[in-house]
């Protein structure tokens, strides 16, 4: 059985700082709270005997830093591989804008459709089919040897929300879960029999 742990990077905004919608073109580091969230991810995996056999992250520093801290806390001593398919989407004209500015341009329904149905709002540079195919290809790659590996993938919210398409029934999953993942949260999928199953979704380890 292959186990896939998907984690969202930790916090990138300081207390009191107005959050912004940061995507592919906004490469910012973690805050101290974000680093604590990364350590909490690693502690969670170690306590549950889910130490990764291999770890991946996006190429953005917030994901790379989260992965590096988490795997050290978990006891993993191998390199973390940075891969482009885990990079956050490009939010187009809404990149690095506050939520108020984004809502003013798009309207609340467009963001609700994004959060509930992964419908990409007008102007954002993201191809849902490409993201889904990337997850399917990644899933096929990590289970190819069927050697009971635990795999960690650290990414961003815009990419992670498409991972349930691996199950083959995204609509049923979305009807039961909030597909949006909080910063510092993780999800656990297992490949059993002949398909992927979501075991846990949006777990927020204690910091």
Image (cartoon, helix red, strand yellow):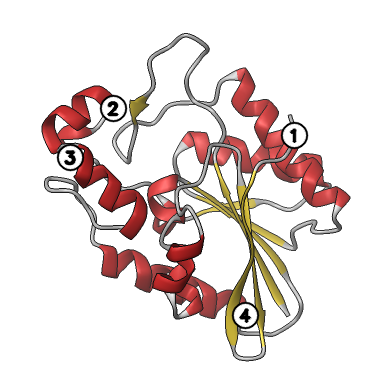
The 10 Å Cα crowd at callout 2, few under 14, some 14 to 19, many 20 or more, is: some
Residue hosting label 4: 143
Whether residue 146 is situated above or below residue 34 in the rendered picture: below
Sequence-wise, the earlier of marks 1 and 3 is 3
Question: Sequence-wise, which precedes: disc 3 or disc 4?
Answer: 3
Residue topped by disc 2: 99
Looking at this view, is 14 or 84 the one in front? Answer: 14
Q: Which numbered disc flags the more N-terminal residue, 1 or 4?
A: 4
Q: Which residue lies furthest to the top in this view?
A: 16
> What kind of element bears circle 3?
helix
Q: How far apart are marks 2 and 1 (CA)?
A: 26 Å
Percent of width and height locating residue 188: 65, 61
Displayed quadrant of residue 136: bottom left
- Mark 4 surroundings: few (<14), some (14-19) or many (≥20) residues within 10 A: some
- Residue annotated with mark 1: 206
The single residue placed furthest to the bottom in the displayed view is 194
Q: Decide which of 110, 120 is in the foreground and name it.
A: 110
Q: Judging from the image, what secondary structure is the residue with disc 1 in?
A: loop
Indicate left or right for 16 with 194 as reference.
left
């Amino acid at each position: 059985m292959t186990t896939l742990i998907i984690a969202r990077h930790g916090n990138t905004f300081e207390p009191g700082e107005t959050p912004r919608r940061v995507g592919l073109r906004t490469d910012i580091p973690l805050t101290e709270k974000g680093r604590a969230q990364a350590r909490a991810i690693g502690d969670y995996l170690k306590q549950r005997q889910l130490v990764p056999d291999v770890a991946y992250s996006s190429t953005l520093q917030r994901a790379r830093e989260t992965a590096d801290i988490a795997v050290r806390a978990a006891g993993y001593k191998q390199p973390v591989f940075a891969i482009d398919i885990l990079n956050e989407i490009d939010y187009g004209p809404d990149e690095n804008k506050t939520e108020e500015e984004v809502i003013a341009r798009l309207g609340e329904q467009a963001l609700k459709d994004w959060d509930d149905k992964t419908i990409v709002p007008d102007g954002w540079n993201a191809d849902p089919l490409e993201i889904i195919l990337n997850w399917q290809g990644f899933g096929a790659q990590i289970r190819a040897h069927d050697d009971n590996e635990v795999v960690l993938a650290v990414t961003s919210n815009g990419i992670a929300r498409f991972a349930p398409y691996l199950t083959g029934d995204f609509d049923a999953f979305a009807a039961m879960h909030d597909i949006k993942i909080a910063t510092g949260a993780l999800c656990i999928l297992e490949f059993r029999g002949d398909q992927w199953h979501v075991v846990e979704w949006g777990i927020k380890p204690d910091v």
